[in-house]
Amino acid sequence: MIEIRGLQKSFGAARVLDGVDLTLGQGESLCVIGQSGTGKSVLLKCILGLEAPEAGRILWQGQPLDRAARARFLAGFGMLFQGAALFDSLSVWQNVAFRLRQRMSDDRARGIALDKLARVGLGPETADLMPAELSGGMAKRAGLARAIADDPKVIFFDEPTTGLDPIRARAIDALIRGIVTETGATALTITHDMASVGLIGDRVALLQGGRIAHDGPVAGMDAAPALAAFLGRSPAPRAGFAAP
Ligand SMILES: Nc1ncnc2c1ncn2[C@@H]1O[C@H](COP(=O)(O)OP(=O)(O)OP(=O)(O)O)[C@@H](O)[C@H]1O
């Protein structure tokens, strides 16, 4: 569905992306991990058209993601931003219904927003609260409700568990996995959190030195040498491996 080939992006003399090749299949959940400053956000911005790469191609459904294709892509796309990024001056339901209100009545948009809030575990009593009245975990849930408000076919999750304690982080992971599974959406998650990778991802890619240093299924990722090196530990023995 999304195919990235030879993507390069520099800032001044610093080449951040140095030939990134990555494919995201329809209905697949891919997690991209990497150290701070390796270019995960830059990669996301190149896909969204917020940064222009010097070289390489991004294809969506086999077509180059030019201006017209990107507009179609973004119309069927949802995103959970790092820190939720709710609009401070809008209530929770208005945030969730932000895109819906551009094409339907407030009554209808509010009804859909309440359904989506319920899906992420927020009751109707939260609908008229302002973002400043929410805890970090509630804000993430509201951001997630906004990401799925328009029933997107593709959803990007940027550091979905950053700033949450482990219990709330796992709850958000479980919600994301449930939503991705039940909607069949294609998902791209950027994260540092390996517990999230295990819960959310079908596949994990490691961005390192401007390239994809590892790309493989989440099942069995403990045995991948590149991931073990990234995490600073020895790879787990493969199934059937007999220790001497
Ligand atoms: N607009 C910009 N101008 C100059 N340098 C930039 C710009 N955007 C990103 N960079 C640089 O590109 C590199 C990659 O940044 P990026 O934000 O993609 O890292 P990241 O992997 O997402 O990090 P983190 O996990 O900490 O969010 C960094 O060195 C950053 O300083």
Image: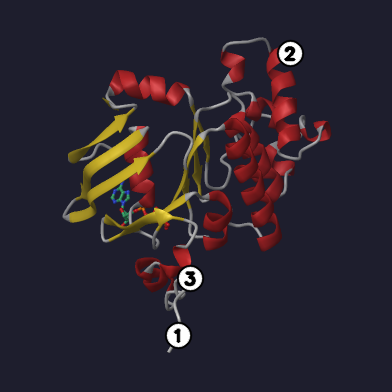
- Residue 243 tag number: 1
The image shows residue 212 at horizontal and vertical percentages of 30, 55
- Residue 239 tag number: 3
Q: Secondary structure at mark 2?
A: helix
Q: Are marks 3 and 2 in contact (CB under 8 Å)?
A: no
Q: Is residue 229 above or below residue 89?
A: below
Give the Cα distance between marks 2 and 1. Answer: 64 Å
Residue sitting at 48 percent across and 59 percent down? 192
Q: Secondary structure at mark 1?
A: loop
Position of the N terminus by quadrant: top left
Q: Mark 2, residues whose alpha carbon is within 10 Å: few (<14), some, or many (≥20)?
A: few
- Residue 107 tag number: 2
Which amino acid type is shown beneath numbered disc 1?
Answer: Ala
Q: Is residue 228 above or below residue 46?
A: below
Give the Cα distance between marks 3 and 2. Answer: 56 Å
Whether residue 22 sits left or right of residue 100 in the image: it is left
Display coloring? secondary structure
Farthest bottom residue?
244
The image shows residue 147 at horizontal and vertical percentages of 57, 33
Q: Secondary structure at mark 3?
A: loop
Which amino acid type is shown beneath numbered disc 2?
Answer: Asp
Give the Cα distance between marks 3 and 1. Answer: 11 Å
